[in-house]
Image (cartoon, coloured by chain):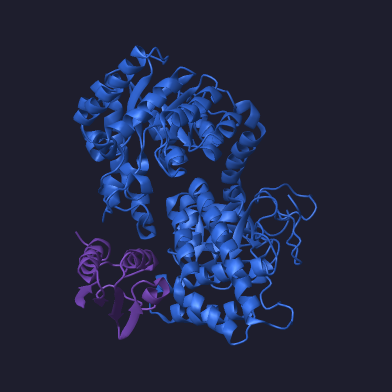
């Protein structure tokens, strides 16, 4: 099991487009991807589920990745967050 | 255009407020009424947020969402197995419709608006939504009822989020559900929302599907009850460059069919405005109407007419096309040539690398189809964002800045040379030019030229014919290419500016991000200065420069391009005549 936490820096939070992208990335791995925020838990491979987190700027997303390719999935998803949710430089 | 058949027929629609008196159902103000008083109907003023600037006067037309068979499913016995299979079929049909809308939005409006259909496709496939519907069916509901129930669940979920943008996505769920319900009820596509004449469209908000299907040439402006500057209507209005006022609250139904002034700059909608307000608008509108009528009447005459500004500068009007089928439409609307042939289509439609003969055949048909007019063929522009399985490209985190276009081609010389040879061979059948995308340095250009010359030498040895004077150019779509244009221009015959990428790289703003639409729209100046720099460089060498991105079709920029001495504007086929008209209007 791999875990990391990412605080959203993007002004716009995790909207449909980044959520869709995240789901697309997560689906590439066999590992289960769970994302928690605001006391809710979402399936990282499902768009509506991710949108339901209502994750705005400043929200801490807690990723839990479990499965045979969890190493790589973790690296990729962390990279995804940095590139799509950090909002800054 | 068929008359409205949705029950509440709106009044016949006036062209604009300046329609002459006496016509049947005239909406023009009655003469003789008090000057400062309102004229027909009750004057009412609504305030909202201007989501897209501009002023317009016209007839209000209320948009009515087609009933979509909602809640009208006939009572019948429901078998879960049957319902599930109906659902699956409807989903498959919806998938196709969404894909078609996506393509249409891409060609008619642009990437930003098109992107929403990618989200729709994902929402349609969403497991949570699918499972909720399937669960409803398993519990004995009809497919329709199960969809409706799932919509309620997820739209409520989204609306309850304390986030205006995410809440606005409830409209997308509704849109997808309506599509499924329409398919289940046996209806075809949704109706085109418009009837005849131009009008200001008034709606609660519009779904992406509705906006794509609207006949945009007739919409003068948008007014929405709700909505925000993130709503689809707003994004669309900005893409169309017409005024939009959002968040005005409920507009009284009495306003339907009435004349109104929409001033999105001031954030005001005036229904049944006063005489003096109308006068000012009338004068403005009359000028624009004349131009519109001129465009309409002289459409045919315009075709083939040299597009020369009043100052005597000639700008050729070329078409951007993506496949051979568009050649006929481009010619019919008087294209002077093809300024951008996106050559990816053959690669995208095959399961393995197309051979030289296949490519040659396709290019030859287009080149000869254009009857001696120039066809600028852009070499392969693919990368991690346009995946082609057999290219076996590594997945990239940031494909826009990645291993794509010429970078890929130079790394895979055999693939590149196959295409270059095919283009060279096609040049014997008309007036072709070759153009390399994503250039950042003169060195890249030299490497491409070397391969190009190798191909020529091979063809000469094989005794194969080609146009030895075929022009060789590059896309200016990176700030680097513009900055280095003095050096690069020594290596080429022409530049063609890809403004979409140039803007995105210059402003460091993802052009597919709807949240950055405003930023991109407000900051054209840095992009224009880079274009100017490139224009000076290439003109200094006796070459020519065209514009082939979305900016080429922006009428607000035509004068500026003329001033820079831009030689050619290449736009999608629907914009050809409008741009020609705009050039003729330039100083």
Q: Residue at x 24, y 37 (%)?
A: B411
Toward the viewer: A55 or B89? B89
Q: Name which residue lies at 59% across and 45% down.
A: B285
Q: Is residue B333 above or below residue B19?
A: above
What x and y, as percent, mark residue B259? 65, 58
Task: Please determine whether, in this image, residue B142 is positioned above or below residue B511.
Answer: below
Q: Is residue A3 left or right of residue B373?
A: left
Residue B266 seen in the current view: no
Horizontal side, residue B479 vs residue B226: left or right? left
The quadrant in which the C terminus of chain B is found is top left
Q: Which chain is drawn using purple?
A: A
x 47%, y 31%: residue: B358
Give the blue chain's letter.
B
Q: Quadrant of residue B426?
A: top left
Residue B412 against residue B152 in the figure, above or below: above
**Measured from the top left, where is residue B251 in percent x and y?**
60, 70
Left/right of residue A51 with respect to residue B55 in the rendered view: left
Task: State the image coordinates of residue B136 (x, y, percent, origin top left).
Answer: 57, 83
Specify the quadrant of the image occupied by residue B343: top left
Task: Count how many numbered circles sit on residues in the image.
Answer: 0
Q: Could you tell me which residue is drawn at 61 percent across and 30 percent down? A: B332
In the foreground, B478 or B289: B478
Whether residue B292 is visible to the viewer of this picture, yes or no, is: yes
Residue closer to the observer: B312 or B147: B147
> Which residue occupies the foreground of this view, B16 or A3?
A3
Q: Quadrant of residue B298?
A: top right
Could you say where residue B301 lies in the image, as x and y percent from the top left? 63, 26
């Amino acid at each position: 099991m791999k875990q990391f936490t990412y605080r959203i820096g993007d002004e716009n939070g995790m909207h449909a487009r980044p959520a869709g992208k995240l789901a697309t990335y997560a689906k590439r791995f066999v590992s289960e991807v769970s994302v928690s925020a605001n006391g809710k838990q979402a399936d990282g491979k499902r768009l509506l589920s991710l949108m339901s987190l209502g994750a705005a700027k400043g929200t801490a997303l807690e990723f839990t990745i479990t499965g045979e390719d969890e190493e790589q999935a973790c690296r990729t998803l962390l990279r995804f967050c940095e590139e799509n949710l950090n909002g800054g430089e | 255009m068929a008359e409205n058949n949705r029950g509440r027929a709106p009044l016949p629609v006036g062209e604009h407020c300046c329609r002459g008196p006496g016509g049947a159902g005239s909406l023009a103000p009655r003469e003789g009424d008090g000057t400062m008083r309102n004229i027909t109907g009750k004057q009412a003023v609504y305030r909202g947020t201007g989501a897209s600037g501009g002023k317009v006067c016209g007839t209000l037309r209320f948009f009515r969402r087609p009933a979509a068979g909602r809640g009208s499913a006939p009572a019948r016995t429901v078998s879960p197995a049957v319902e599930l299979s109906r659902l699956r079929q409807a989903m498959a049909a919806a998938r196709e419709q969404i894909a078609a809308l996506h393509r249409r939005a891409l060609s008619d409006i642009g990437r930003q608006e098109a992107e929403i259909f990618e989200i729709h496709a994902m929402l349609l496939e969403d497991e949570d939504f699918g499972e909720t519907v399937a669960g409803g069916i398993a519990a004995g509901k009809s497919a329709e009822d199960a969809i409706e129930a799932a919509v309620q669940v997820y739209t409520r979920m989204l609306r309850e989020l304390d986030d205006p943008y995410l809440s606005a996505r409830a409209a997308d769920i509704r849109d997808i559900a309506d599509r499924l319900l329409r398919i289940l009820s046996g209806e075809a596509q949704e109706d085109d929302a418009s009837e005849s004449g131009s009008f200001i469209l008034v709606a609660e908000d519009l779904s992406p599907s509705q906006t794509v299907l609207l006949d945009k040439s007739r919409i003068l402006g948008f007014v929405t009850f709700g909505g925000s500057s993130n709503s689809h209507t707003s994004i669309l209005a900005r893409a169309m460059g017409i005024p939009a006022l959002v968040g005005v609250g409920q507009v009284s139904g009495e306003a339907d069919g009435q004349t109104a002034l929409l001033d999105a700059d001031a954030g005001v909608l005036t229904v049944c405005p006063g005489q003096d307000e109308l006068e000012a608008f009338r004068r403005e509108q009359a000028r624009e109407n004349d131009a519109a009528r001129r465009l309409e009447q002289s459409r045919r005459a315009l075709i083939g007419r040299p597009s020369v500004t009043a100052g005597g500068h000639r700008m050729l009007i070329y078409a951007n096309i993506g496949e051979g089928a568009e050649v006929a439409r481009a010619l019919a609307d008087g294209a002077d040539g093809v300024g951008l042939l996106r050559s990816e289509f053959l690669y995208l439609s095959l399961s393995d690398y197309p051979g030289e003969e296949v490519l040659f055949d396709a290019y030859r048909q287009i080149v000869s189809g254009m009857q001696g007019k120039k066809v600028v063929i852009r070499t392969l522009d693919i990368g991690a964002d346009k995946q082609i399985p057999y290219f076996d490209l590594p997945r990239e985190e940031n494909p826009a800045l990645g291993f794509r276009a010429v970078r890929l081609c130079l790394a895979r010389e055999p693939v590149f040379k196959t295409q270059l040879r095919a283009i060279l061979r096609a040049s014997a059948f008309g007036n072709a030019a070759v153009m390399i995308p994503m250039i950042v340095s003169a060195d890249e250009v030299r490497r491409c030229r070397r391969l190009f010359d190798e191909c020529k030498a091979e063809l000469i040895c094989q005794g194969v014919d080609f146009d030895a004077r075929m022009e060789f150019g590059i896309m200016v779509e990176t700030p680097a290419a513009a900055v280095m244009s003095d050096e690069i221009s020594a290596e080429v015959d022409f530049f063609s500016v890809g403004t979409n990428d140039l803007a995105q790289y210059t402003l460091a703003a993802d052009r597919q991000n709807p949240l950055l639409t405003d930023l991109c729209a407000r900051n054209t100046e840095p992009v224009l200065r880079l274009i100017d720099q490139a224009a000076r460089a290439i003109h200094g060498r006796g070459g020519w420069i065209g514009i082939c991105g979305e900016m080429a079709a922006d009428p607000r920029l035509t004068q500026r391009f003329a001033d820079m001495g831009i030689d050619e504007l290449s736009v999608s086929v629907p914009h050809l005549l409008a741009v020609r008209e705009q050039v003729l209007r330039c100083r």
